[in-house]
Image (cartoon, rainbow, N blue to C red):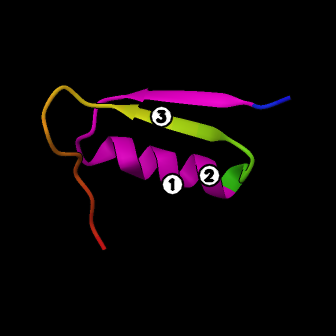
Amino acid sequence: MAKNLVIIGGGAAGPSVAAEAKRGDPSLNITIVEQGEHVSYAA
């Protein structure tokens, strides 16, 4: 069964939480919902 995670907010914390969740469970389907045009990220 697929597990889904929806993150509200694309500021610095949203992608950080998504990355940590994906490291914890690589089978997660993650969706980030952001109101603006761009999602924050850092290399």
| Towards the viewer: 8 or 13 | 8
Q: Are marks 3 and 1 in contact (CB under 8 Å)?
A: no
| Label whose residue precedes the other's in the sequence (3 or 1) | 1
Q: Are marks 2 and 1 in contact (CB under 8 Å)?
A: yes
Q: Which mark is residue 30?
A: none
Q: CA distance from mark 3 to mark 1?
A: 11 Å
Question: Which quadrant of the figure contains the C terminus?
Answer: bottom left
In this rendering, position of residue 14 left or right of residue 6: left
Q: Amino acid at mark 1?
A: Ala
Count the marks: how many? Answer: 3
Give how far apart the Cα atoms at labels 2 and 3 are. 11 Å
For this view, does 19 lie left or right of residue 29?
left
Q: Is residue 12 located in the magenta-colored stretch of the structure?
A: yes
List the residue tagged with mark 2.
22
Camera-side mark, 2 or 3:
3
Q: Which quadrant: the N terminus?
A: top right
The residue carrying mark 3 is 31
Q: Is residue 29 above or below residue 20?
A: above
Residue hosting label 1: 19
Residue 35 in the image: x percent, y percent? 18, 25
Q: Quadrant of residue 5?
A: top right
Q: Residues within 10 Å of mark 2 (few under 14, many from 20)?
A: some
Measured from the top left, where is residue 38 in percent x and y? 16, 45
- Is residue 31 located in the magenta-colored stretch of the structure? no
In front: mark 3 or mark 1? 3
* Residue placed furthest toward the front: 37
Instruction: Give the residues in magenta.
Output: 3-23
Q: Callout 3: helix, strand or loop?
A: strand
Task: Report the residue at 62% width, 51% height from top.
Answer: 22
Q: Which amino acid, mark 3?
A: Thr
Measuring 55% from the left and 38% from the top, which residue is drawn there?
30
